[in-house]
Image (cartoon, grey):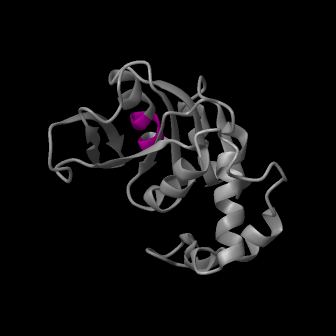
Amino acid sequence: MSDDTATTDAAPDLELIQAHIRDVPDFPHPGILFKDITPLLNHREALAAAVDGLAAPFLGAGVDHVVGLEARGFIFGAPVAMALGAGFVPARKAGKLPASTIGQAYDLEYGTATVEIHADAVTPGSRVLIVDDVLATGGTGKAAVDLIRKAGGTVVGFSVLMELSSLRGHEKMPDVELHTLLSV
């Protein structure tokens, strides 16, 4: 699959994808409308459409690695990597990877967190696509971009299933090609 042609060039079926994302009110806290992707994951055609849609803009871009952000970015990142003929790199919370790591801290509402990859996962000059399920405030996404650059990689894009547009997370990554399947 190294020729970057594993997925279709057709536009993803956004209606099919949207139809399989369930709204759960007041989860995990009152006033939050949670976007549950488990029905999408359980529907073969909707899942395939989502993976194809996340990968399609980067076919032929020479992606060497796809970085999936913990945890649901793993679910989409691995098949996107396969579709692009690339390797998969899990970006995890601090302390979860067994070998030597590099990390990038980012701010949370109350404190900080760190995202890490193995120190040897992204080689200098590698072309990297970052994949996640949701882009919210952009803190984790920006940290991932900074982490890939710290490792010497080139971020070719950030592909996300849905962006919570009111939170304006894309503004934290103005110099990154952002591909969003759904804006909610």
Q: Residue 70: x, y in percent? A: 38, 55
Identify which residue, 20 or 58, lies in the foreground: 58
Q: Nearer the viewer, residue 8 or 140?
A: 8
Residue 167 in percent (x, y) is at: 59, 48
Q: In the image, is residue 18 above or below residue 84?
A: below
Which quadrant would residue 149 be assigned to in this image?
top left
What residue do we see at 75% from left, 76% from top? 19
What is the quadrant of the C terminus in the image? bottom right
Identified at 61% across, 50% down, the residue is: 83
Residue 96, located in which quarter of the rendered image?
Answer: bottom left
Where's residue 161, x and y in %? 63, 56
Left or right of 156 on screen, residue 48: right
Q: Residue at x 69, y 33 (%)?
A: 60
> Can residue 135 be spotted in the picture?
no
Magenta segment boundaries in residue numbering: 140-144
In this rendering, does residue 11 appear at all?
A: yes
Q: Residue at x 72, y 63 (%)?
A: 49
Count of numbered tags: 0
The percent coordinates of residue 171 (x first, y second) are: 59, 33
Q: Relative to 17, is 109 on the left or the right?
A: left
Q: Is residue 25 left or right of residue 142?
A: right
Asked whether residue 12 is drawn in magenta, I would say no
Whether residue 142 sits left or right of residue 109 in the image: it is right
- Vertical relation: 150 (above or below) 51: above
Residue 69 higher or lower than 102, as above or below:
below
Question: Which secondary structure dominates the residues rendered in magenta?
Answer: helix
